[in-house]
Image (cartoon, grey):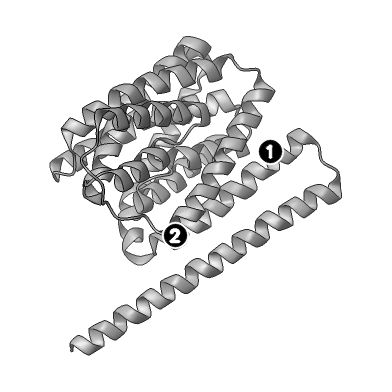
Amino acid sequence: MRKLLLVALAGCVAQLIDGSLGMAYGVTSTTLLLVVGMSPVLASASVHLAEIGTTLISGLSHAKFGNVDWHVARRIALPGAVGALSGALLLGRLPVHLAKIWVSAFLFCLGCYLILRCLLGRGIPHGADPSTRTLVVTGGVAGFLDAMGGGGWGPVATPTLMVATRMQPSKVVGTVDTSEFLVSCAASLGFLLTISSGGIAFPIVACLLLGGAIAAPVAAWLVRHMHPSLLGVAVGGLILLSNAHTMLETFRLPGVAALTAYLLVGGLWLVALAVASGAVLVERFYSSLQRGLEI
């Protein structure tokens, strides 16, 4: 019962982050499931099964508000599904110790990426309309990494489309979220083929969905009161520390070396938090100053 409550909490936290940042549901959920003791394959499988429901709801909502470019969604979803199926089949056949270190290393890299992206900004669309080749490559790579690491579709596909296309940010987020439904279905199929439905704890999947459903309205409130960049840096640091612990255990570093590594990661995280907090304060100061001048 305690484990199910922790999983529900993981789904709740992940939805809070994803609802505020538009990404990181998979990477956050998978990291938290690994922390509570779930194997990498079952963690990724559980997250993708839960995402079938969350991405369906998200896609319908985006479509209702006109945030989906269906032409782009179709062209990125199909290669994404192929990549996700391939990644799930490969992960399901890896030895447990190799799968654990791969997933932890990948999530650690995504945590670094999340922090850097929040510190440096999201970027402004300035390129041409997306070519089929760009969408196929982006979808295939993002889908493969998403299944292999339990997260990665949003962190890879969203910034790529924002930088390489003229799509509006709202369209990019809506299109990527909607196309992820097919990716989640394909990844789930791959995991079912490799570990069978008997190996999946469906109560855990249900708890992830329940936690996400509870957090959805809270995330909508949070995004209006907490700066997305600051939240992203905070979450990225937690992801770094959690997965650093797994990697250090795997390599069995001496106590002093492990402590040094923890302090280094923690110190860099605190620096990033300070930089993000300063940027938010400066932004709010200039916004207040501008409003004062307009009055």
Q: Is residue 243 above or below residue 279?
A: above
Q: Which residue is mark 1?
A: 246
Residue 54 quadrant? top left
Residue 152 in percent (x, y) is at 45, 36
Q: Secondary structure at mark 2?
A: helix
Q: Is residue 194 above or below residue 21?
A: above
Task: Categorize mark 1 by other alpha carbons within 10 Å: few (<14), some (14-19), many (20+).
Answer: some
Q: Nearer the viewer, residue 44 or 205?
A: 44
Residue 16 in percent (x, y) is at 40, 50
Q: Amino acid at mark 2?
A: Leu
Task: Categorize mark 2 by other alpha carbons within 10 Å: few (<14), some (14-19), many (20+).
Answer: few
Q: Amino acid at mark 1?
A: Thr
Q: In front of the other: label 1 or label 2?
A: 2
Residue drawn at the location 69% of the way across and 43% of the way down: 245
Q: Quadrant of the N terminus?
A: top right
N-term mark: 1 or 2? 2
Residue drawn at the location 85% of the way across and 47% of the way down: 255
Residue 191 in percent (x, y) is at 47, 17
Residue 179 quadrant? top left
Residue 217 in percent (x, y) is at 30, 52
For residue 120, the mark is: 2
Q: Quadrant of the C terminus?
A: bottom left
Residue drawn at the location 24% of the way across and 38% of the way down: 175
